[in-house]
Amino acid sequence: MAAVVGLAFSQGGVLGRFDITRAYSVTLNVLPPSLDCKRIYKTVQCVKISCPLWARLAKTQMEVDVKTPVETMYDKLGPKVVKALEKRFFEAWYFSDIPEAVEKVFSLIPKTDTVSWGGSTTAVSINLTTLAAEKGYTVIDRDKAANPEERIELMRKALLCDTYLAGTNAISEDGQLFNVDKNGNRTAAMIYGPRQVIVVAGMNKIVRAEADAWARLKAIAAPANAQRFPHLKTPCNETGSCAECLSADSICAYFVKTRLSMPKGKIKVILIGKNLGF
């Protein structure tokens, strides 16, 4: 539950704040015209104000959920991982919240680009794929295929698009990307083909080291992803646990480590301080 904080205002802005979580509520009957709401937003990190002028306050993002300990940890770790990625020639950014991350993604894509993507639950969950079409980009969307043959052709064409959107299954704290793929189209695109690859990942994908990354792929990423396809006859779809299977339905054919981004800056990584995807 968000904290309730009372604020004292003057023509100059915020004078101070006091915690009234044990009181009933605080009502601001007068909102000075000169009130610098953006300044308040930056000053007060964890607030929820009960106010008859809520509509105006909402527009200035005055309602901010209290960060969880995990989100606070992400805010500290994210910038460190960004620096590690940059040392390996990735371009990288960290954002605490999804809207800022989405805005950054589209700032990186020229309006003339053809855009495509792999099977990224993260990209879908934050509406990147829908927004790409709505913003007028030419998109290659395999899910629009009329039949399996056309779907394969669209996946092939995606390998030569201008901007490829992707998730990743794990990122080590020293700045390496780790992925497991069935068909290899996503990992292939990350290696060669598109002019740029934009990887969007929740901070839940960050692991300490390489061994932890491979373990995450087998213990979490692949078994969770398999649940999206109930028809697959794999042990993990039955038990939820990896059995190192050799099933014809296995979604674990290609394990790929991206140690460096080559050419420099081709792969751009946007980290978000939330739990997203598998």
Image (tube, rainbow, N blue to C red):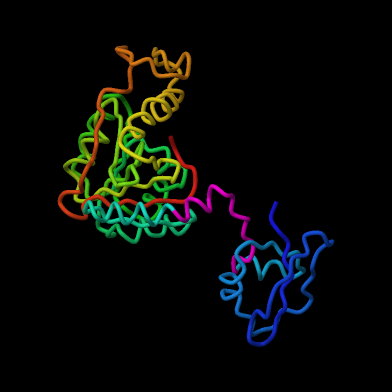
Q: Which residue is drawn at 68% across and 67% down?
A: 55
Image vertical order of residue 146 relative to residue 160, above or below: above
Q: Residue furthest bottom?
A: 11
Is 65 positioned to the left or the right of 93 in the image?
right
Residue 158, percent from left and from top: 24, 40
Magenta residues (range): 60-76
Q: Which residue is drawn at 36% across and 55% down?
A: 105
Q: Residue furthest right?
A: 24
Total marks shown come to 0
Residue 124, percent from left and from top: 43, 42
Image vertical order of residue 208 relative to residue 60, above or below: above
Q: Residue at x 29, y 41 (%)?
A: 177
Image vertical order of residue 178 relative to residue 23, above or below: above
Is 273 positioned to the left or the right of 27 in the image?
left
Depth check: give the residue in front, 265 or 45: 45
Whether the magenta-drawn stretch holds residue 65 is answered as yes
**The C terminus: image quadrant:** top left
Q: In which quarter of the image is residue 255?
A: top left
Residue 24, percent from left and from top: 84, 61
Q: Which residue is drawn at 61% across and 73% down?
A: 40
Depth check: give the residue in front, 194 or 86: 86
Image vertical order of residue 9 relative to residue 173, above or below: below
Whether the magenta-drawn stretch holds residue 44 is answered as no
Is 218 positioned to the left or the right of 76 in the image?
left
Residue 10, percent from left and from top: 69, 85
Depth check: give the residue in front, 190 or 59: 190
